[in-house]
Image (cartoon, grey):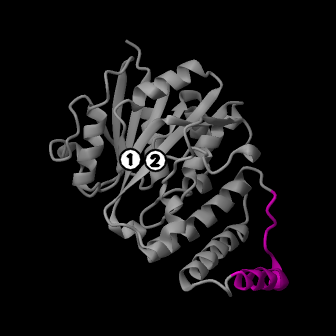
Amino acid sequence: MTISISVIVCTHNPNPELFRRVMSALVAQRQVDSKWELVVVDNRSDVVLSNRREDLAIPVFASVVREEEIGLTPARLRGIRESKGSLLVFVDDDNVLADDYLNAALEIFGMHGHIGVAGGIISPIFEQQPSKIVLDSIGLLGVRNYGDAPMRALVGNVVGPWEPIGAGMVLRRAVAERYLTLAREPLRRSLDRRGRSLGSCGDTDLARCAWDLGLYSAYEPDLRLEHLIPAFRVKPWYLIRLHFAIAYSGTVLDRLRGGSLPVIQGIRGNLWYWLAAFRRCISLNPYRAAVRLADALGRYKARRLTLG
C-alpha cells in the first residue's frame, strides 16, 4: 500500500518524559484511513537515539535516522528526504497530537486540493505558569487559537498571525520538495535552531513555499495539539533572547523572499534608528523595554547584512 502520510519528529537530546508522551500520542492515533509512517530524526544527540528506543518509547514501526549536521533545518531536510508520504506532518519533540490529528489532516487535504500547508490549534501545557509580566510574549512559544472557523490565503500580505508554524505543520510533498531546493542556500539553513541559537523562521520559509507553487496556507481548527512547555521557556531572560532571535530571523527571511526593507548604512542611519528605538522604550516597564530593544537589535543586525 502506498504511504499517504509521513510523520517527521526532529529531536536533539530529548527530554525522556516529554518524548515518551509525544510517542504515546502518535501510537494512539485513531485508526488512520491510509497507511502512514513515522520517521524520527536524531539530530546529533549526545547518546544515539537508536540505542534508546525502549527508554524513549519509540514504537517498533518507526524508523530512526541520524543527522550529523546540527540544527533544526538540517534535521527537517533529512526527514523530508527519508520520508515517502504524499503528505508530511512535522511534530516537535514536545508536541502531543490529538488522537484524530492524522485523519483530520488526510480529510482536509483530500477535500481541498488548493491547500499546500496547514496548521491548527496549539494549546499550552505549562510546567510552570508564566508570570503576568511575560504573558504578552507567550505567543512566541507557538501557542495559538484563532477560533473555530478555518482561514485560508494564497498570498502573504493577507495572512495574519495564524500562518502555519513548525509544530504540527502539515504540507504536501511538492511544497517540501520546493524547500529542499531553496534550503541549499547557507543563510536559509541558519534561520532555525542551531546549538544554543534560538533562531527561528525556517518553518515560515518552509510554509511560504506553498505560495511559490500557487497553493494556499491554511488555519484548520480540526488540527489540534498540545505543546509541553518547560519552566525555563517562560522565564523573562529566555523570552527576551527569543524576541531578538525572531526579529533577526524574520527580517532576514523577509529580505531573502524579496522584501524591500532598507539596509541601515552610515553613522546617520544608525543614529536615527537607535534614537527611534529608545524613544519607544521610555514609558515602558523594564521587561517590555528590554523586549523592544531586543526586537530592535534583531532587526538592526539583520538589516546590516549584505545578502548575496
Residue 275 part of the magenta segment: yes
- Which residue is label 2 attached to? 122
Amino acid of disc 2: Ile
Between the residue at mark 2 and the residue at mark 1, the CA separation in whole angstroms equals 6 Å
Q: Nearer the viewer, residue 250 or 150?
A: 150
Residue 15 counted in the magenta span:
no
Which residue appears at 76% of the width and 47% of the height? Answer: 157
Furthest-top residue in this view: 1
Q: Residue at x 69, y 73 (%)?
A: 300
Asked if the residue at tag 1 contacts the one at tag 2, i.e. Cβ–Cβ closer than 8 Å, the answer is yes
24 lies left or right of 289: left
Residue 102 percent location from the top left of the image: 41, 29
The image's mark for residue 183 is none
Residue 145 location in percent, x, y?
52, 48
In the rendered view, tell whether residue 79 sits above or below residue 298.
above
User: What x and y, as percent, mark residue 130?
Assistant: 41, 69
Which quarter of the image is occupied by the N terminus? top left
Residue 82 in the image, given as x and y percentages of width and height: 41, 33
Res 226 label: 1
Residue shown at 60%/35% (left/top)? 150
Q: Quadrant of the C terminus?
A: bottom right
What stretch of residues is rendered in magenta? Answer: 260-280
- Image point (34%, 33%), residue name: 99
